[in-house]
Image (cartoon, rainbow, N blue to C red):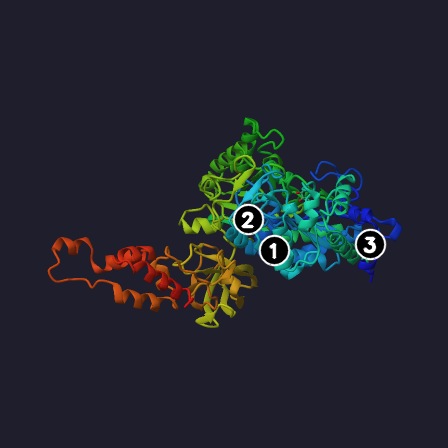
Amino acid sequence: MTDIKKLISQMTLEEKAGLLSGDDFWHTKAVERLGIPRTMVSDGPHGLRKQDLKADHLGINDSIKAVCFPTASATAASFDPKMLRDMGAAIGDSCQHEQVSVVLGPAVNIKRSPLCGRNFEYFSEDPYLAGRMATALIQGVQSRNVGTSIKHFALNSQEHRRMSSSSDCDEQAIREIYFPAFEMAVKEAQPWTVMCSYNKINGVFASENPWLLTEVLRKEWGFKGYVMSDWGAVSDRVAGVAAGLDLEMPSSGGVNDRKIVKAVREGRLSEAAVDLACERILTIVYRYLESEKPETPWDMEAQHAQAADIAADCMVLLKNEDQILPLKKEDEIAFIGEFAAKPRFQGGGSSHINCFKITGALEAAAGLKVTYARGYSVADDAATDEMIAEAVEAAKKAKAAVVFAGLPDSYESEGYDRQHMRMPECQIRVIEAVAAANPNTVVVLHNGSPVEMPWIGRVKAVLEAYLGGQAVGEAAVRVLFGDVNPSGHLPESFPLKLEDNPSYLFYGGEGNVTEYREGVFVGYRYYDKKKMDVLFPFGFGLSYTTFDFSDLRLSAGEIGDEDTLEATVRVTNTGDRPGKAVVQLYVGSPSEEVIRPVRELKGFSKVFLNPGESKEVAFTLDKRSFAYWNQSLHDWHVPNGTYTIEIGDSSRNLPLCAPVEIRSSAVIPRHYDMNSIFLDIVADPKAAPIIRAFMAERMPKPVEEGKSEAAAEAINEEMGLAMLNYMPLRAVAGLGGHPEAEGEVEALIRRLNGEE
Ligand code: BGC
């Protein structure tokens, strides 16, 4: 084991400052004098994008041939962390083979709006799902002794002005929505590195934010690795070192290294902070070097096959009227749309992979009775009359028509956001023309984020393939023809229209400020609270078989907030095909005290079942499953009350429900003053008897006798009490009508506060 501290003690200040930024675009610096070699990092997240020669972070120049696995938009839909772990291990192997020490991913930013250009790289609108998937991917990669860089920390849910915009958000939403995926991954998988985002958070750049990078990430969550900047995210490098940003990427050409040296010499930055950053970087550098295995084989064909298996298990069957799917292999089927031949399976930007091979659905269907019509041109984003006529002709002749549609590359990419949620006009025309020609029309969608579907009523089936990686065509054919039973579920809500989305009014922001005004009500948390119709709800996905949920049992009917609760449920395959069910558990909280979502996902499990087979699934819930972030406690808190455990296969299909009573052990510090109101004082078990006794002595007794009818109507007892609820103590002092009243109330306040 290399003695890192000793190495650092031998370095000059210049060498140490130098180590805190990249050597070039993709390498950490070497210190040859001390035998410290440089190491390479590469994108990420769904495969390896290693650039040998010309470097850039926008996907402009070529990288080496590699395997593009399904993007996070698709893998999240699998609800299968085990599968993600295996995918991570495969990516880890390719990194070992290529001598890459850290792969830049996973990316776990929350899908706040369907418009974010990078949604295809992100997992979900739900932090728990995003956290579980990210944790699994990290564990997989790191099982091969290669590091990960969970990104982009944090609140980077838009591309618009991404390098200058401030994401302004209340701490409750940050803690409940935008942090948990990072938090879970750090606590459960210890990513070797974290990548901070470009944006500011409440006015402070992530790259120089001590609260973010030190207080929360390291002190609260226990992160042990190094923090690197997103490419070009550094504004004030010296402030960054002090805040906990260890490595600046890419190289600053020495400019910032000199600023660090100067700041230390002038006493504006402690040398200890520089040493600490060096220690964190070198610890990871040597962790990799000491387990480097360039002899690891990289079997790309095997990984392509793995990518196909994964993609098939990610596909979400959204509609299947008359059980039109699966198609029969003996029938003549028309494949329509350029995406059938040349699928869209990944997005633009830094995650763009140079695939060693790509399989389209048409190629994968070789040997079946499949005809093809191009339908539309992706390059021209247009469909000529001839193309439509040809598509209609092909559809008429076939038993069923499958239109491959979705979003072309230019519609969604890193670097900019979408302006709308619509599909290309030309593709809609093709779908409508084909559907009019053949009642058995199926649509396969390739898109990284939700689209509006004005045509949905006219087609029989819809299969959401997302951006499913280079083998997506094979996967689509397996699902369409029933070799694989679809088991994906939506990791996000599909609103009917963009305007329904909770961030719609504020998304993108004004100038360099974007306010996250919807707070915790992101995705289904909003649609459920508002009881709004959606096109497809979070968690939704059909299968070629059917499942039944029964026997929900809780380990206790009442628990303390520090206890755990076991929930078990039976799931049965009631259809005639083997299939995988996604059992989802949501927690609902009492709504009296705090404004909270109706339900939140707190557990899920993917279960394979043969026809007729039944399995018991168990979930363990802990304090965090029930808690919300309490601003005054500045901690997680579970208020007393009755919570509900709901089980089903989507956020809107939850046939089982059971209550659990939770007692809080937290003592909320309360302080009373002249402006405290009765309602709050009476709700505090300690204060209630004190104020009751005080009032009993002083309140005038209601005179019922002789009260006029008008007076009785004006206010009855119930109304009187309700009014008293909102009365502050200062009003009691005022109402006392004698000079000592104020002093008496002040004495009461001291007693309420336990001061006498
Ligand atoms: C992206 C990161 C990526 C980096 C390096 C940046 O533009 O935001 O996700 O890892 O470039 O390519």
For the N terminus, which image quadrant? bottom right
| Residue occupied by mark 2 | 327
Q: Residues within 10 Å of mark 2 (few under 14, many from 20)?
A: some
Task: Examine the rendered structure and indicate whether residue 214 appears above or below residue 50.
Answer: below
Label 2 vs label 1, nearer the camera: 1
Q: Amino acid at mark 1?
A: Val
Q: Which type of secondary structure does the marked residue at label 1 adopt?
A: helix
Foreground of the two, 393 or 579? 579
Q: Looking at the image, can residue 755 be seen?
A: yes
Q: Amino acid at mark 2?
A: Leu
* Residue at 33%, 65% in the rendered image: 691
Task: Point out the quarter of the image occupied by ligand 1.
Answer: top right
Q: Which type of secondary structure does the marked residue at label 2 adopt?
A: loop
Q: Residue furthest front?
A: 739
Q: Residue furthest top?
A: 385
Q: Is residue 95 left or right of residue 596?
A: right
* Residue at 81%, 55% in the rendered image: 8
Foreground of the two, 681 or 372? 681
| Residue occupied by mark 1 | 216
| Residue occupied by mark 3 | 294
* Residue at 67%, 48% in the rendered image: 45
Residue labelled 1 has its Cβ within 8 Å of some atom of ligand 1: no
